[in-house]
Amino acid sequence: MTPNNQNYKNIFLVGFMGAGKSTVGMILAEKIGYKYCDADKFIEKQAGNTITKIFAEHGENYFRDLESESMESLSAQEKQVVATGGGVVQRDRNWDAMNSGGTTIYLKAPIEVIWERIKHSKGRPLLLVENPFETARELLNKRTPLYEKADLIVDTSNLSLEEVAEEIIQAINI
């Protein structure tokens, strides 16, 4: 798919946890001269708390409300690469913000690749369950059709993070 927003006001990286959004985002931003923003860190700064604590103290719906407010704020800015949280695609409100504020790019990888990247991570509240691999698989399967609404899809499975950034640059011709 070809990106539909030719001005590239912002670039929003979407994808499952462990897809490489944060690291690719930093590399991409540096290469094209944009600012880099990690949406989860932005939310933590706004809320004055970690995402893990926000989930524990207020629940997922409260976090998703904060996330939507943050996406609307971030989409109003310009010339930034935004690494979004993995669940941002679940709300139309977030898609509206991202689509009005720039181009969306889905960093895609199969569950086996993702699991190798995230299996030792402790900061993923949705995986603090009895069977985190199965939970991750179910979440990825549920979210994949939503991720695929992005303007561009880049399979990160067999690419280095640097190669992913280069593929994005070539695809959007920025």
Image (tube, helix red, strand yellow):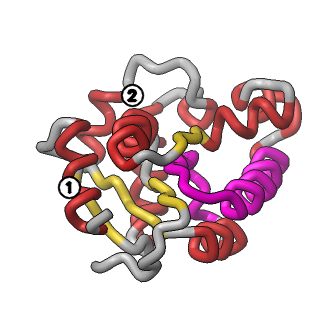
Q: Main secondary structure of the magenta part?
A: helix
> On the image, numbered disc 1 is attached to which residue?
167
Q: Is residue 58 magenta?
A: no
Q: Quadrant of the C terminus?
A: bottom left
Q: Identify which residue, 71 or 133, lies in the foreground.
A: 71
Q: Is 143 located above or below residue 139 in the figure?
A: below
Residue ID at (30%, 79%): 2
Mark 1–mark 2 Cα distance, whole angstroms, equals 23 Å
Give amino acid for label 2.
Answer: Ile
Q: Which mark is residue 118?
A: 2
The residue drawn where x is 54% and y is 32% is 127
- x, y percentage for residue 80? 54, 51
Task: Examine the image and state in which quarter residue 147 appears.
Answer: bottom left
User: In this rendering, is residue 154 above or below 8?
Assistant: above
- Decide: few, some or many residues near mark 2? Use Cα within 10 Å; few <14, some 14-19, many ≥20: some
Secondary element type, mark 1: helix
Q: Secondary structure at mark 2?
A: helix
The residue drawn where x is 84% and y is 47% is 62
Amino acid found under the numbered disc labelled 1 = Glu
